[in-house]
Amino acid sequence: MLIDAYNAVRARVDEACARAGRPPEAVKLLAVSKTKPAEDIAELCAAGVTAFAENKVGELCGKQDILTDEGLEWHLIGHLQSNKIKYLARRPVALIHSVDSLHLLDELQKAGEKFGRVWPILIEVNIGREESKTGCDPNDTRLLAEEALKRPNLALQGLMCVAPAVNDPEEARPFFAALRVLRDEIAQFAPDCRELSMGMSGDFEVAVEEGATLVRVGSLIFGARDYSKQA
Ligand SMILES: *Cc1c(COP(=O)(O)O)cnc(C)c1O
């Protein structure tokens, strides 16, 4: 049962909170359902899980069309191409985690005006400065945050990162700590910039110890992903 795997992850989040002297409510567990069928999500919903994350706009929309319960919370965590924003016009999106350029801020602002909505966003930071990763350079985070604040149809709520893949999750700790420092700096002029979306299946406990408020866990809940069936 998927709910057993989910509960096991939640218990580990709670233990990490306890080690860090944080209340368990301080961390939301997002079930990353990308590549998994809507039936898997429905199974978790039936057991009371409400917060899900997808990395592609098309897949998000497809699953929302099947799972219409208004109590569900949908997070977009993958790289957002500006030509896909229009498909989100009337979609419930709790948070866009992956805003990493001035161009995207502009396109979201334009779409927000057009559709009459304010987008809750996180700035994605390439905290390990890896060639292969999306996210802004850590040095550009402050500037992007300032620019986000100038745009009335954007609500900056925090920062997000995908830490470098490491063998020992302890090696990811400095990256999570660095994102937290950035968040604290930005919160001095952007008081709503509180969230830290960090930690995945391999490193979420360390992320929680370093202050994560949102952890994005996929394979530990749903099992390994099979990309061979995808177009
Ligand atoms: C896939 C994905 C996750 C979840 O990864 P797991 O290792 O399966 O937990 C988290 N964040 C992002 C941005 C992802 O694309």
Image (tube, rainbow, N blue to C red):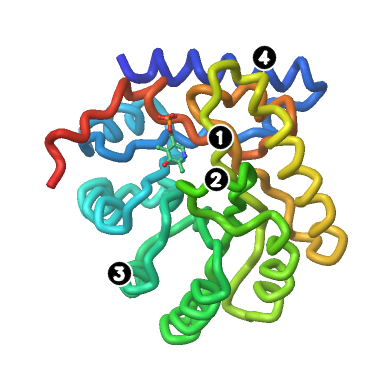
Find numbered disc 4 in the image and state the secondary structure of the residue it sits on: helix
Where residue 111 sits, quadrant-wise, is bottom left
Which residue is most to the front?
A: 131
Question: Which residue occupies the foreground of this view, 137 or 66?
Answer: 137
Q: Which mark identifies residue 130?
A: 2
Q: Check whether the beta carbons of the residues at disc 1 and disc 2 lie within 8 A of each other.
A: yes
Q: Position of residue 210 (x, y in %)?
A: 74, 30
Query: Mark 3: which secondary structure?
Result: helix
Which label sits in the foreground, 3 or 1? 1
The circle drawn on residue 87 is 3
Which of the pair 186/175 is nearer the observer? 175
Q: Is mark 4 within 8 Å of ligand 1?
A: no
Separation (CA) of disc 3 from disc 2 = 30 Å
Q: Which is more foreground, mark 2 or mark 4?
A: 2
Report ligand 1 position as a quadrant: top left
- Residue 108, position as x, y percentages in the image: 49, 75
Q: Residues within 10 Å of mark 1 (few under 14, many from 20)?
A: some
Residue 15's tag is 4
Instruction: Determine which residue is flagged by label 1.
Output: 164
Which residue is rendered at x = 51% and y = 76% of the image?
103
User: Which x, y percent locates residue 23?
Assistant: 75, 27
Indicate which disc, 2 or 4, sits on the residue closer to the N terminus. Answer: 4
Identity of the amino acid at label 3? Tyr
Closer to the observer: label 3 or label 2?
2
Element type where label 2 sits in the image:
loop
Amino acid type of the residue that numbered disc 4 sits on in the rendered structure: Glu
Of callouts 3 and 2, which one flags the residue occurring earlier in the amino acid sequence? 3
User: Type of residue at label 1?
Assistant: Pro
**190, 2: nearer the viewer:** 190
For the residues labelled 3 and 1, say whether their Cβ atoms are less than 8 Å apart. no
Mark nearest the camera among 4 and 1 is: 1
Q: Position of residue 80 (x, y in %)?
A: 41, 61
